[in-house]
Image (cartoon, rainbow, N blue to C red):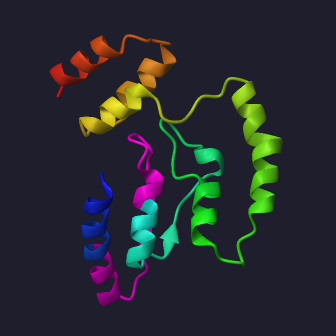
Amino acid sequence: MYPLEMRRLADKYLEAGEKYNKQIGIHAHDNQRLAYANTIECAMRGVSYLDATMGAMGRGAGNCAMELLLTFLKNPKYDLKPVLRFLENHILSLKKEGVVWGYDIQYLLTGYLNQHPRAAIAFTGEKREDYFNFFQELQEND
């Protein structure tokens, strides 16, 4: 999804939330490197709950990065220092150990084709690098 689509959906759900006295949230995946853009688009529309993870950690392509979101919000009640310390002490070591998440071409392709990322997750697990063949497989299964 792109920010323009998120704007339309946020407005739709905010209207429904207002009708039923409910707050609305966003949980964005980063298949096309748009989790941050989509999250801030929703924030600007009035969405209350903004889901983010440290270092953009999340299954597959990951999620909106907490550190990015906090710098955008520029709210003095949010302190970036503990987030940076957590990234240093925990996220970096996970990456060094070989834990894999985040944007990669296979997630771009599943996002582009609006497909569930399970194929990209399998592609990563198999340590494949044949993006062209993978893209053709995705199109055949579409």
Q: Does 33 lie within the magenta span?
A: yes
Q: In the rendered image of this protein, does residue 130 appear above or below residue 32?
A: above
Instruction: Give the answer, above or below, for where 109 lies relative to 124.
Output: below
Residue 46 appears left or right of 74: left
Residue 68 point in image, percent of width and height: 59, 56
* Residue at 57% from the left image edge and 66% from the top image edge: 72
Q: Residue at x 78, y 33 (%)?
A: 93
Viewer can see residue 71:
yes
64 vs 44, left or right, is right
Q: In the rendered view of the protein, which quadrant contains the C terminus?
A: top left
Q: In which quarter of the image is residue 135?
A: top left
Residue 115 can be seen in this image:
no
- Give the x, y percent position of residue 36: 48, 55
Above or below: residue 20 compared with residue 30: below
Q: What stretch is highlighted in magenta?
A: 13-38
Total numbered circles: 0
Residue 41 among magenta residues: no
